[in-house]
Amino acid sequence: MRIDIVSLFPEFVAACAGFGVVGRAQERGLLSLHGWNPRDYAEGNYRRVDDRPFGGGPGMVMLIDPLRAAIAAARAADPAPARVVYLSPQGRRLNQARVRELAGRERMLLLCGRYEGVDERLVRAEVDEELSIGDYVLSGGELAAAVVVDAVARLQAGALNDAESAAQDSFEDDGLLDCPHYTRPVSHPLGDVPEVLLSGNHAEISRWRRQQALGRTWERRPDLLDEQNLSPADRALLAD
Ligand code: SAM
């Protein structure tokens, strides 16, 4: 997958993506990141990329032309079509289903705003979708872009080692939260590992994990539990 990042600080996103699973995905050729700085396409001695908002008020607004030129340069760098995704608190909120959908694309272009955001005419002309990473306001789109890059990188086939498989993570296929996990030592001043996990009985272990996942989801995120879709076995586990 190819991801182009249009940002005043593209190195910031690249730095966030240099470690662990995401770094490895790049090393394995599963993901390539390309930064495009609108300042490189700005004109004049000061290479201006922002200006005051019409109508007055605080803050600055990102200029159309440097952004447009950076987007055009990114598009021209590769023949694969790229949808432009503007990271914005006003966009559709990101969730794992959306991450899956984005991860399946061959290419996308992430547009990061700064200041009060970008000129609305640029959004209308160039942006295919707006994406928010939550109901709060960041000072720039770079952290949001790094979140998207991380979440989609780990879903590229071959990015995760077996032991890190995404299949049982929270929000995956069954939409539940993940069960709790334990490792050595078996006994610790902070508590013991639940006995069932030491039993070697795979059916019992699966049952316990499912029950924990259901219980946690019910306690912490009841909005994720679509009771209509719970199987009779799940209902029995929840009631247990
Ligand atoms: N004035 C804008 C508003 O209230 O909708 C906020 C602008 S914010 C200070 C600057 C930039 O940060 C935005 O253009 C966007 O790219 C990014 N940003 C801020 N919060 C975000 C969020 N929750 N999700 C994605 N991007 C965000």
Image (cartoon, helix red, strand yellow):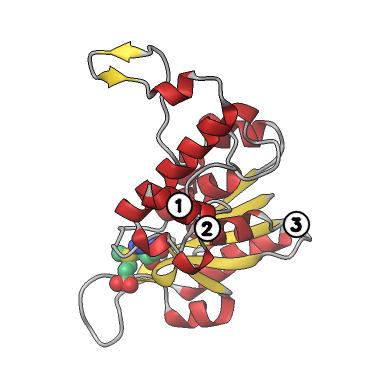
Q: Earlier in the sequence, mark 1 or mark 3?
A: 3
For discs 2 and 3, the disc positioned in front in the rendered view: 2
Q: Residue at x 62, y 45 (%)?
A: 155
Q: Which mark is residue 160?
A: none
Q: CA distance from mark 1 to mark 3?
A: 53 Å
Residue labelled with disc 2:
232
Which amino acid type is marked by label 3?
A: Asp
Q: CA distance from mark 2 to mark 1?
A: 6 Å
Q: Earlier in the sequence, mark 2 or mark 3?
A: 3
Instruction: Return the x and y of residue 136 as percentages of the image width and height.
Output: 29, 62
Residue labelled with disc 1:
236
Instruction: Return the x and y of residue 112 as percentages of the image width and height.
Output: 45, 60
The kind of secondary structure element at disc 1 is helix
- Residues at circles 2 and 1 in contact by the CB criterion of under 8 Å: yes
Between residue 229 and residue 150, name the one nearer to us.
229
Residue 105 is at least partly visible in this image: yes
Which amino acid type is marked by label 2?
A: Pro
Q: Please, which residue is most extreme toward the right here? A: 79
